Image (tube, helix red, strand yellow):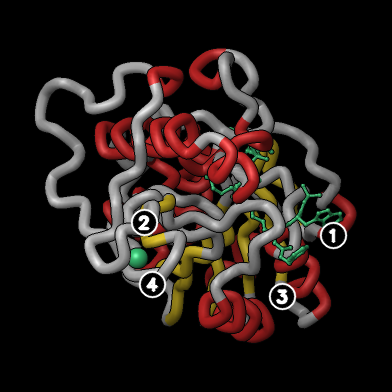
Amino acid sequence: MFDSSLIIALQQARRVVVFTGAGASAESGIPTFRDALTGLWENFDPAQLATPEAYFANPDLVWAWYEWRRQLVTDCQPNAGHVAAASLQDHVDQVAVVTQNVDDLHERAGSSDVVHLHGSLHHPYCSSCSQPHNFSGAVADGAPLVAEPKDGLPPPACTYCDGMIRPGVVWFGESLPQAEWQRAHRLVADCDVLFSIGTSSVVYPAADLPRRAHASGAQVVQINPSETGLEDWVHHNLVGPAGRLLPQLLQAAFPDEPSPAA
Ligand code: BJW
Ligand code: ZN
């Protein structure tokens, strides 16, 4: 089912980077961005809300949308793809997850080295003085805090300067966090295998990482049910959902790995 050269590359790899996007969390029930204008996101265009301009123009709407999403993530569980990414640590010397996702599902699946390029839903901070904000139980037990994101919810005030608290994510036009971006560069330059999983590869600079890995001599493996444009740069293109293919690949490369559920 898998090319033997992929199995051998994985068995011999000492350093692996698992680069993920929204598709990695799709099977946990978290909608992606660009497949997302139907279903849960039908009233919102994420590309319109994920900007500083949108937040300052309508802070109640944007804050409510992010709080609603934080609740959604809190209620979701890691899927078999997250678990398989964490299991790689049992077989490879160094495994780093470099994710564009703002959820914490890789950590909850057991990955111990997770680099968040686009921030986190769980680490908001002050839009004026940048102090981190402590949620202090803002996700209520039982009744959801934001029933419908369109209801609006004013952002809390900063306890230091009274400024507006903003989501701890990276919006369009904002720089990626320096330390994380530099770490991602180093990891990609040094890895033997890079997986690009569940990302449309359209948002830069993150989308450049698989090409950089390719240029540094790594084997690049894409897992995605759809075409992304990265196909010309990958050595192995695995077409299908990550929650099925990544566990199957691990089983094929490391037969002591528990079998994926049928
Ligand atoms: C599955 C699956 C399953 C489904 N299994 N797979 C022109 C050219 C180049 C760059 C630019 C440009 N104009 C502007 C820019 C810069 C801009 C950019 O790249 N824009 C492009 C859209 C053109 N980038 C930025 O602004 C970045 N900053 C920057 O460049 O700083 C320098 C600068 C400063 C000042 C001025 C200009 C430049 C910042 C980017 C921040 C991105 N932020 C977001 C929102 C985060 C907060 C939030 O969550 O709301 O990050 S946008 C959104 O896209 C989010 C994601 O992390 C990111 C990537 O999306 P992702 O993960 O790839 O998801 P999808 O939905 O696109 O794809 C899902 C995939 O999964 C699909 O392929 C499915 O097929 C697949 N899939 N089920 C496996 N089961
Ligand atoms: Zn402040």
* Amino acid type indicated by mark 3: Ala
> Which of the marked residues, 2 or 1, is nearer the chain's N terminus?
2
Q: Residue furthest left?
A: 141
Q: Position of residue 61 (x, y in %)?
A: 47, 30
Q: Secondary structure at mark 4?
A: loop
First in sequence, mark 3 or 2: give its number: 2
Residue on which disc 2 sits = 124
Q: Is residue 230 left or right of residue 258?
A: right
- Report which residue position mark 4 lands on: 113
Say which element carries label 3.
loop
Q: Amino acid at mark 2?
A: Pro
| Disc number lying in front (3 or 4) | 4
Q: Single out the residue that lies furthest toward the right.
A: 232
Answer yes or no: is residue 30 visible.
yes
Q: Tell me the amino acid under the disc marked 1.
A: Trp
> What is the x, y in percent for residue 251?
44, 51
Q: What is the crowding at mark 3: few (fewer than 14 residues within 10 Å), some, or many (at least 20)? A: many
Which residue occupies 11% across, 24% down?
142
**Residue designated by label 1:** 233
